[in-house]
Image: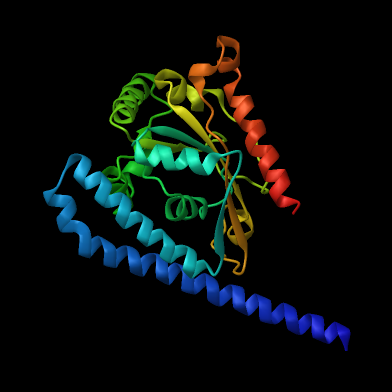
Amino acid sequence: MNNELQLYKKIIVKEENYMRTIFYHLVLVGTFIYGSIFHIWYLIFNRGEKRYRYVCRVAKNWVKNLIWGSGSKVNVIYKNGSEEEVRKIRENNEAVILISNHQSNVDIPALLGYLPLDFSFIAKKEMKKWPAIGRWMRSFDCIFLDRKNARQGMKDMKDAISKIKKGHSYVIFPEGSRSKDGTIGEFKKGSFKLATDTNARILPITIVGTYEVQSRKSLKITPNKNIKIVVDKPVDLKSMSREEKKEVHNIVNKIIKDNYTEEKNL
């Protein structure tokens, strides 16, 4: 009897996951098409800061629909006085570099939808040519880095620096790719060059739970998960010694790993 009950539960869970996956992707595609048609005229006839802020608002609304479609919830946790710091960042329009671990494709909607800041992303150059999405990312002031062409990479970095000076914040995933097993890897030192070149403060972000919603190279969505975004206090490069700056990638990595371990074990 117990074996039959366990089998029945497995079938129910499998069917629920299957239906949730279909529903999530219908929401993703449907809302993207609707949004593209509805907002395209604004993108065509507006440029610069006005368009950037508009796209930020549209993106936040869109990705909240995706989280709803996934059947999971997002909880933002502030540590070490970071909530007040985030409020000041928003009020002063301060450009910061958000450094985060990368668990899943769901990371981006979770961050965009639930952090109370306007920001864009540092992305690989191939994404610039993606149909439709690439156009939105360009309107969103994403920076597309060419990792294979050093000269072009330097131009991309100069572009990023100029946008940070305008008050635009950026998210960087310094692991370089999504986690294969849900653990946090080492951070690439070069990912912190944008912060060290501009002296912008670093906001350590830890994402917990998105890997369980959608793992790497999988379309399957598993609902009813609790996604946590842990925001720690900003790391101020201006107050660091030269030696500390050289190790900032390890310092931030430890902050994010410690917060991940703490929240994962709760």
- Looking at the picture, tell me which residue is in the foreground, 66 or 117: 117
Given the current orientation, which residue lies at the most extreme top position?
Answer: 242
Tell me where residue 230 appears, x and y as whole percent.
59, 46
Question: Is residue 244 toward the left or the right of residue 83 in the image?
Answer: right
Q: Is residue 186 visible?
A: no
Q: Quadrant of residue 257?
A: top right
Tell me where residue 212 appears, x and y as whole percent.
64, 58
Given the current orientation, which residue lies at the most extreme bottom position?
Answer: 1
Q: Residue at x 14, y 51 (%)?
A: 44
- Looking at the picture, tell me which residue is in the foreground, 100 or 135: 100
Tell me where residue 227 appears, x and y as whole percent.
59, 57
- Looking at the picture, tell me which residue is in the foreground, 30 or 93: 93
Q: Which residue is drawn at 51% across and 53% down?
A: 105
Question: Is residue 26 toward the left or the right of residue 133 in the image?
Answer: right
Q: Can residue 210 be seen in this view?
A: yes
- Looking at the picture, tell me which residue is in the foreground, 28 or 61: 61
**How does the figure colour the protein chain or chains?**
rainbow
Q: Residue at x 43, y 51 (%)?
A: 112
Question: Is residue 186 toward the left or the right of residue 21 in the image?
Answer: right
Q: Quadrant of the N terminus?
A: bottom right
Task: Give the tally of numbered discs.
Answer: 0
Q: Quadrant of the C terminus?
A: bottom right
Tell me where residue 28 appears, x and y as whole percent.
40, 65
Given the current orientation, which residue lies at the most extreme left position?
Answer: 45
Q: Residue at x 37, y 24 (%)?
A: 153
- Say above or below: 219 vs 44: below
